[in-house]
Image (spheres, grey):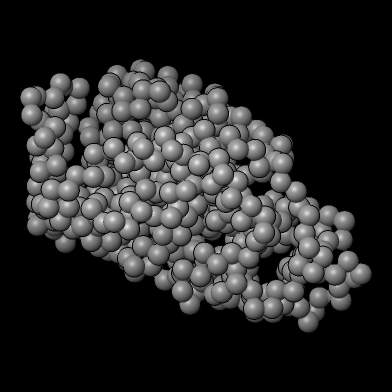
Amino acid sequence: MNRKLLLVLLGILTTSFAAQDIRRTENSIVISHVTVIDGTGSPAKPDQTVVIHGNRIAKITPTGNAPAGGSAGELDGTGLYLIPGFWDADLAFPLLVANGVTGVRNTGGHPDDLKRWRRETAEGKRLGPQLIASGPVIDGPPPIHPDHSVVVKDAAEAKAAVHHLKSQGWDFIKVYDNVPREAYFALAEEAKKEEIPFAGHVPLSVTALEASEARQKSIEHLDGLNYVISPKGGQFRRDRLERIGKPAQPGEMMKLPMRIASEINELADTYDEARAASLFAHLARNATWQVPTLSVTRVFASIGESAMYGDDRLKYVSPGEREAWEHNPIVHIDIPEYVAARKRALQQALHITQAAHQSGVPFLAGTDSGGVPYLYYGFSLHGELALLVEAGFTPMEALEAATRDAARFLGINDAGTIETGRRADLVLLTADPLSDIRNAEKIKAVIVGGRVLDRKELDGLLKGVASKTK
């Protein structure tokens, strides 16, 4: 998605609802006879009435105990399901809101844009998800994303970077692939001292086990886990580390797909259950959250499949971005051995996710939309939930990974569940997501901070994006 689309101003939307759909008493919303899936892990509660005042949930009670509706009436939730708004790990306002995403953990972007968007949503000038952001990432030389990276070469620079980002008001620190070993551990020490979490990739200079022991709060993409699980992983990691910053040799890029395929296959062939169990035990004990972004792995596993390249959701992507996707070799390498290895990598990621989850490792849902071709803001989160279920999560656990657990991870005490006093960030569904996680896509309305967007307005959001990408 072209990031220019993020500039679509949602503040121009109104909350003019059809009288037969939603009626309000001044600044209140009443939803009666609705089944509440509150995100706390409790069973679904049928026939509830939820009262919202302003941007807060004021009351939750069985409908039979609720006062009769006044002259302003109420929304009849018969046959509908109310769940907490989703959290994702990316950012694009209209598509996210239309898909029920009311909170975003942004893991790296341009500081000026992020600060402006966060300020405007907080002030009510822009309708969008609550935004938690890391700002620039911390990387080593050469940085993979030079346009939004703070580059550190040693311990002193790492500590200074943590102090600087904390002073800028960012919510957490994101580490990236090329951070040197000395700098990484200095960063971890300074983050603890400054009381700011750090998360992200596992730099090639350390192992995933070391990152967990250093109290890195989350690991994105299951990064580095295979290198610990396989006895051959250490050598693969060191080989990659040695190549950092070195110019590519003639013909090396042509060999890259087969090198990737070879690594995937060797790591899968040498998967060691005992090493995996030991790693998962450490991750669980240290509460090192995993954000597997299985949707990313599925994109690479879908190379060559016409359905991916002809997806109807391409209409929400700008022409320039579509062209970039079409010419991006990373998703068009059709070497059979490479494609087969990518499919195997997906199965391996599903297996690791399932085994780690069963071992008590905490998980969050996230998609990396905007960073990988053929992932779509908002829509891909629903695909991620389905992949979590495929990896052995119950539908309830998958929902929790995108609601309650996301808020808990971020230290947000007033969101993620449907409870009195919490933010009114809610999604109203027409079918039960606990019977089929895909029902989480059947959205009738989204409530963002107490502001209701009905289906007509959500469709208007989608049409507005599509009209700007023609």
Q: Nearer the viewer, residue 272 or 457?
A: 457
- Indicate whether 182 appears above or below 81: above
The residue lying at 60 percent from left, 72 percent from top is: 430
Viewport quadrant of the N terminus: top left
The residue lying at 55 percent from left, 56 percent from top is: 99
- Indicate whether 118 appears above or below 438: above
In x, y percent, where is residue 181? 25, 28
- Indicate whether 128 appears above or below 383: above
Q: Nearer the viewer, residue 113 or 423?
A: 113
Outermost right residue: 71
In x, y percent, where is residue 122? 68, 38
Outermost bottom residue: 64
Is 397 left or right of 31, judged from the image as shown?
Answer: left
The residue lying at 46 percent from left, 31 percent from top is: 109
- Indicate whether 129 appears above or below 396: above
Q: Is residue 129 visible?
A: no
Is 182 left or right of 412, judged from the image as shown?
Answer: left
Q: Quarter of the image holding residue 212?
A: top left
Q: Quarter of the image holding residue 330?
A: top left
Q: Is residue 334 visible?
A: yes
